[in-house]
Amino acid sequence: MKIVIGNDHVAIEMKQALQAYLEEKGHTVVNTGVDAPPCDYPVIGYRGAKMVADGQADCAVLICGTGLGIGMAAAKVKGVRVCTCSEPYSARMARCHNNANVLTFGARVIGVELAKMILDAWLDAEFEGGRHARRVAMLEEIDRTGRLAAAEE
Ligand code: RB5
C-alpha cells in the first residue's frame, strides 16, 4: 500500500519508528510530517488527509500528542473517514464497518509497540460492505451535500 505518515513535533520519534516498521512490511511510505520542531498540527492533518482524498495515497497515519487535533483537522477534508484509536479493536472495526482511510493516535497516549499493533489491526482488516456500505454512503452524502436525507424524513 501507499501510506502517508504525518506528525507534529510531539511525535517525531514515534513517526520515525512507525515509518521504518511500515517500510519493513513492504509498504511505500510518504513522510509528510516534521522531523524538527515545531509545527502546527492542522497543517499536517490537512495535508495528509488531502493526499488520501486526492488519490495520491491509499490511506494516512497521522500522529500528534493526543491524535485528536490532527484528527479534527483531517476530518474537515471531504472524502476521508478518520478514526482516532488507542487500541487495536477499534482500529480493526474502523476498517471493517466504517472503511476509515485515515488513522490517528497520540504519541503522548500510547507507546510505539501498541501503535504497531493498532496499525497491524487497521491495515490487515477489510471493509465488510453490505449494510455498512449503505451507512458509509450516508457519511459520503453528508460530506458531499452538507445534509442527510434519511435524517430529514
Ligand atoms: C502540541 O502541544 C499538542 O497540542 C498537539 O500535539 C496535539 O496533541 C493536539 O491535539
Image (cartoon, rainbow, N blue to C red):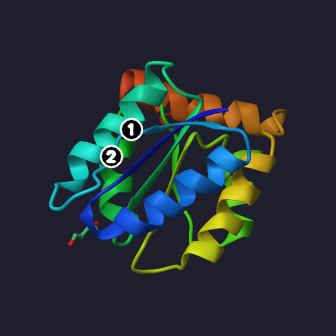
Callout 1–callout 2 Cβ contact below 8 Å: yes
1 to 110, vertically: above or below: above
In-front residue for pair 48/95: 48
27 to 24, vertically: above or below: above
**Which disc is residue 48 wearing?**
1
Residue type marked 1? Gly
At x 71% / y 67%, what residue is drawn? 117
* Residue 45 point in image, percent of width and height: 32, 46
At x 37% / y 29%, what residue is drawn? 50
Q: Which quadrant of the frame does ligand 1 lie within?
A: bottom left
In-front residue for pair 109/30: 30
Q: Secondary structure at mark 1?
A: helix
| Residue where numbered disc 2 is placed | 45
The quadrant of the image that shows the C terminus is top right
Say whether residue 40 is left or right of residue 34.
Answer: left
Q: CA distance from mark 1 to mark 2?
A: 5 Å
Say whether residue 13 is left or right of residue 130.
Answer: left
Residue type marked 2? Gly
Question: Label 2 CB, ligand 1: below 8 Å?
Answer: no
